[in-house]
């Protein structure tokens, strides 16, 4: 167990942070803005737990938003990073570890025949979009409301007029022309995609989606949806792009494409493949990926891409996943967790629904079914915020937003489940209508 490194309390750090960081954080969701209250500051992670600057311990269901499927500070990861550290932190020249990671991703993800490593999910998705546009010679692409693909301009789009025809920026600083070619439709609405592509299909470079939505709560594809998108994109010469930054190595070892048996032309990855260090990747069919510089004309680059520390950590975690299949056990924990949470909520008259897929899970304060972001928006988000705070006070750290998914690690066990469901019953009582 690492000693405490904190000399300041969370509240001291929080008041200092707000002076020097926009909103006090380096990523908005960490600010607790959508659930209320002040964020705690982390001192250290221990397996399935976080310990904050005041020494308080929480069962962690965020796991750094996905990367830590082996839990915090797993010895395999620590040893891999330590082993590389004294050999240097970055070279700007090729290393064997990058080749090993690429071969591993190709071996584990059905749709990847060639891959490029980058430093984040955002870099992976913005690069994949450029490749799709460069390969097809088309500019328009379709995304789905509630799917988050990082913060590159083309993806920061709200529903424009006519929804599917005109994207409008949903952030200042994103010029209209940056999102003019972004079409937007509700997730799981295959008929709407068919209607759009019927006479506009040959204008589209890609259909881009999270095959399982994890940024609107957890929303699964309905039977036939992914298969339908595969057929439509094939028919119209558009690329099918699965953003598996979150679902990769999370809903199954080979991601959603393995679980649902639909193979995209391009896949983006992140999170788990870096084991908490900055690694993203985009890959797919060889003939598509060969347009990427320097083998082809589509430019993409990065000083720290394939960084030796990050690939050391990522290879250690991927090697473990190659040799072990934790997903059945992870999913059974998730199923029990979701069932217990829903029972606790419904026992006090709070309608709830949700499910678990592999090592991801989600509960909506909504009677269900939730099949799109539009449905998710009907959830009782205010009561969720109160529940989040009650759970935090009982040592359980849920995602500080109703529109996020939960994540598990192999180290979440009976003790953590019992603690979580006891807290859920008490928290539900505390926020009951
Ligand atoms: P990053 O640039 O944050 O590494 O990845 C962007 C991204 C791309 N695609 C999907 C499907 C993603 O879920 C993400 C990032 N996920 C969020 C969690 N909702 C990261 C958390 C944060 O923004 O702090």
Image (cartoon, grey):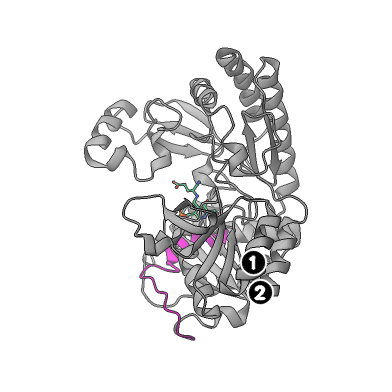
Could you say whether the residue bearing mark 2 is in a helix, strand or loop?
helix
- Callout count: 2
Which of the 4 image quadrants contains residue 235?
bottom right
> What percent of the width, then of the height, locates residue 240?
63, 67
Circle 1 sits on which residue?
197
Could you say whether the residue bearing mark 1 is in a helix, strand or loop?
helix
Confirm or reject: label 2 Cβ below 8 Å from ligand 1: no
> What percent of the width, then of the height, locates residue 263?
70, 67
> What percent of the width, then of the height, locates residue 103?
61, 73
Residue 189 in the image: above or below residue 302? above
Q: Residue at x 35, y 70 (%)?
A: 303
* Callout 2 crowding tier (Cα within 10 Å): few <14, some 14–19, many ≥20: some
Q: Residue at x 49, y 78 (%)?
A: 134
2 and 1 marks in contact (CB < 8 Å): yes
Circle 2 sits on which residue?
236
Query: Mark 2 vs mark 1: which is more N-terminal?
Result: 1
Q: Residue at x 26, y 30 (%)?
A: 15
* Magenta region: 295-316
> What percent of the width, then of the height, locates residue 431?
56, 16
Which of the 4 image quadrants contains residue 151?
bottom left
Q: Which is more foreground, mark 2 or mark 1?
A: 1
């Amino acid at each position: 167990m690492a000693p405490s490194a904190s000399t300041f309390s969370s509240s001291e750090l929080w008041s200092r942070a707000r002076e020097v960081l926009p909103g006090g954080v380096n990523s908005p969701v960490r600010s607790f803005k959508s659930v209320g209250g002040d964020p705690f500051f982390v001192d250290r992670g221990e397996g399935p737990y976080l310990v904050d600057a005041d020494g308080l311990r929480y069962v962690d269901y965020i796991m750094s938003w996905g990367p830590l499927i082996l839990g915090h500070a797993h010895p395999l990861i620590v040893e891999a990073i330590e082993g590389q550290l004294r050999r240097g932190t970055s070279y700007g020249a090729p290393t064997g570890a990058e080749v090993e990671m690429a071969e591993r991703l190709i071996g584990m993800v059905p749709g990847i025949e060639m891959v490029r490593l980058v430093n984040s999910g955002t870099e992976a998705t913005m690069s994949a979009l450029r490749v799709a546009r460069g390969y097809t010679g088309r500019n328009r692409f379709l995304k789905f409301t509630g799917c988050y693909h990082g913060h590159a301009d083309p993806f920061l789009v709200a529903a424009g007029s006519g929804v599917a025809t005109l994207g409008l920026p949903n952030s200042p600083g994103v010029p209209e022309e940056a999102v003019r070619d972004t079409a937007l439709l509700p997730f799981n609405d295959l008929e709407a995609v068919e209607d759009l592509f019927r006479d506009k299909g040959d204008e589209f470079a890609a259909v881009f989606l999270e095959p399982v939505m994890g940024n609107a709560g957890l929303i699964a594809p309905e039977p036939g949806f992914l298969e339908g998108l595969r057929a439509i994109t094939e028919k119209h010469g558009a690329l099918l792009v699965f953003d598996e930054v979150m679902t990769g190595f999370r809903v199954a070892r080979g991601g959603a494409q393995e679980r649902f048996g639909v193979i995209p032309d391009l896949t983006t990855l992140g999170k788990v493949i870096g084991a908490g260090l900055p690694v993203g990747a985009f890959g797919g069919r060889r003939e598509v990926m060969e347009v990427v510089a320097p083998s082809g004309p589509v430019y993409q680059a990065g000083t720290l891409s394939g960084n030796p520390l990050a690939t050391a950590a990522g290879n250690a975690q991927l090697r473990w996943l190659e040799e072990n299949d934790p997903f059945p056990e992870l999913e059974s924990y998730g199923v029990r967790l979701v069932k217990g949470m829903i029972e606790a909520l419904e026992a006090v008259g709070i309608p709830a629904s949700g499910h678990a897929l592999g090592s991801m899970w989600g509960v909506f304060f909504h009677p269900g079914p939730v099949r799109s972001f539009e449905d998710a928006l009907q959830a009782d988000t205010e009561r969720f915020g109160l529940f989040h705070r009650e759970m935090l006070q009982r040592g359980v750290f849920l995602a500080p937003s109703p529109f996020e998914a939960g994540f598990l690690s192999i180290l979440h066990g009976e003790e953590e489940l019992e603690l979580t469901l006891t807290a859920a019953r008490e928290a539900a009582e505390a926020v009951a209508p």
